[in-house]
């Protein structure tokens, strides 16, 4: 027999089905292959909060989970949401004390030792003394004899410690294991250390899933609603369904994008119709595109208007969003939130790194989004090569002009990708790429860099954010209202409050 299962290891925030597992199982379902999703992240957190915690004398988590699943109102209340997430996180902190060196959160797991060291992960897995071991052993007893071939879907480094352990347990039980997903393909294409991943797992595939079904056509050409091993509710007030309108990026010109060579493809709207037909009532659609294309959004709106209770996704704040009354039609069709990469208030910085829009255009887009009642979740990036104090001040001035129009904010300090056009043209941009961890055998997606002129834009950016940006009376209230845990999906489902 060759009964398959799709497995998503911890830790992924358990507010929605992991996109990679969903697409893999859904693509197999469309080809007549049953491969139930085993979301071990959701399972681990349910076990920890509902079974282990009460017996161990930790805080009672059930009221908090009940609120996240059914808040009693249409949207979460920010203060209550912070409180219940704090309860869950405090239990995680208490639990991790039983495992010296480990750091756990609702979004991440970091093992002791050298970060991303695969040899260390193998030793930890075989020790049988990780935070996941007790739950995994219970799960292994439960699934015994139900499948012969496990398809492990990895999207994040945070899943790797648990993935190594669950693969070891499955293979010990005589189950064939194939490991794939965006983490593996990204390491191969734009990172370093794929050979280390191969040392952890006997079979690693790097394609989009087509090798599993021995096809040449793109795997996402056919998707249906997948099968779930458990019918548990996710920790969200409404079911959230991930869906890509495209693969790749329509812009594909940003100099520090590590995915410039990722093939672009439109995903058929018929696939979305199939998923909605087989899925739960009134879902939220999470558009997982690296950048939602305007044309694809236009084509999608009639489908969403009558079939869902909302959607959200990521957009570059370019002028195309202001044309043809598009944002207004999106609001009418249930757009709850737009994540926008405004990145900088400096025209020089945006032009230098080929972002394809100006700060003035971004301001207009963000202003229109706010006016229409769509939540604004805005990303800003500091510390780019050549960035000056003047550039950073321009970003703060931009935010000040947008006072009252930004709901949530994400602040990042630039990391230089292992492989991207900027890394290849480092000398031209006045930087010298370095190496993290010396000669350590670790997985890497980024590398440090030095500036030829002696400046340190990353250090300067951190100081600016700490001393100037965060404390600013326009910025601080927005950061305080941005949830720390359960990010984008719950932000889209958060009650809008008066903006500062």
Image: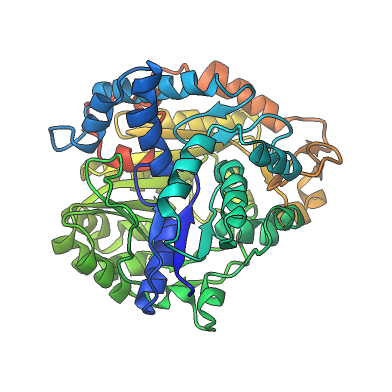
The one nearer the camera, 288 or 351, is 288
The answer to which of 261 and 347 lies nearer the viewer is 261
Q: Nearer the viewer, residue 307 or 452?
A: 307
Position of residue 444 in the picture relative to residue 367 (left or right)? right
| Place of residue 293 in the rendered image (x, y in percent of width and height, measured from the top left) | 40, 64
Q: Is residue 483 above or below residue 329?
A: above
Q: In the rendered view, tell whether residue 259 sits above or below residue 2.
A: above
Q: Is residue 272 left or right of residue 209?
A: left
Query: Can residue 477 be seen?
Result: no
* Residue at x 46%, y 38% (from the top left corner): 135
- The x, y position of residue 125, in whole percent, is 64, 41
Residue 27 in sight: yes
Horizontal and vertical percent position of residue 299? 28, 71
In this rendering, the answer to whether 60 lies above or below 362 is above
Farthest residue, direction right: 439
Residue 481 image position (x, y, % from top left): 34, 25
The image quadrant that residue 112 belongs to is top right
């Amino acid at each position: 027999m060759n009964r398959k299962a799709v497995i998503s290891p911890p830790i992924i925030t358990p507010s929605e089905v992991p996109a990679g597992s969903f697409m893999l199982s859904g693509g197999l379902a469309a080809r007549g292959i049953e491969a139930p999703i085993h979301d071990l992240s959701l399972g681990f957190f349910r076990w920890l909060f509902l079974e282990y915690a009460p017996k161990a004398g930790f805080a009672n988590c059930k009221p908090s989970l009940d609120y996240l699943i059914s808040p009693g109102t249409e949207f979460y209340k920010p203060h209550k949401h912070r409180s219940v997430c704090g309860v869950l996180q405090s239990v995680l902190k208490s639990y991790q004390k039983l495992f010296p060196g480990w750091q756990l959160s609702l979004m991440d797991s970091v093992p002791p030792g050298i970060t991303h060291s695969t040899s260390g992960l193998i030793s930890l897995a075989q020790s049988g003394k990780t935070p996941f071991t007790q739950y995994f052993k219970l799960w292994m007893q439960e699934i015994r004899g139900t499948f012969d071939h496990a398809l492990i879907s990895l999207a994040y480094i945070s899943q790797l410690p648990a993935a190594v352990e669950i693969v070891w347990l499955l293979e010990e039980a005589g189950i064939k294991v194939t490991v794939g997903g965006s983490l593996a393909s990204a390491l191969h294409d734009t990172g370093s250390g794929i050979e280390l991943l191969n040392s952890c797992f006997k079979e690693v595939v790097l394609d989009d899933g087509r090798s599993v079904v021995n096809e040449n056509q793109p795997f996402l050409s056919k998707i249906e609603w997948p099968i779930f091993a458990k019918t548990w509710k996710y920790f969200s007030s409404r079911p959230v369904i991930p869906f890509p309108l495209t693969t790749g990026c329509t812009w594909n010109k940003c100099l520090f994008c590590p995915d410039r060579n990722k093939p672009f493809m439109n995903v058929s709207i018929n696939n979305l119709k199939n998923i909605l037909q087989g899925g739960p009532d009134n879902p939220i659609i999470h558009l997982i595109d690296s950048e939602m294309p305007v044309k694809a959004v236009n084509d999608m709106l009639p489908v969403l208007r009558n079939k869902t209770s909302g959607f959200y996704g990521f957009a570059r704040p370019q002028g195309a969003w202001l044309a043809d009354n598009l944002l207004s039609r999106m609001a009418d069709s249930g757009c709850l939130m737009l994540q926008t990469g405004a990145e900088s208030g400096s025209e020089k910085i945006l032009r230098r790194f080929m972002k394809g829009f100006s700060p003035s255009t971004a301001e207009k887009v963000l202003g229109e989004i706010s006016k229409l009642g769509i939540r604004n979740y805005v990303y800003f990036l500091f510390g780019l090569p050549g960035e000056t104090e003047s550039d950073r001040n321009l970003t703060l001035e931009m935010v000040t002009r947008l006072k009252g129009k930004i709901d949530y904010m994400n602040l990042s300090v630039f990391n230089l990708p292992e492989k991207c056009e900027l890394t290849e043209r480092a000398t031209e941009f006045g930087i010298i790429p370095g190496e993290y961890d010396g000669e350590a055998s670790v997985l890497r997606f980024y590398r440090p860099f030095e500036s030829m002129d002696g400046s340190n834009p990353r250090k300067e950016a951190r100081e600016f954010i700490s001393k100037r940006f965060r404390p600013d009376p326009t910025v601080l209230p927005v950061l305080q209202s941005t949830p720390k845990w359960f990010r984008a999906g719950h932000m889209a489902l958060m009650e809008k409050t008066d903006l500062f």
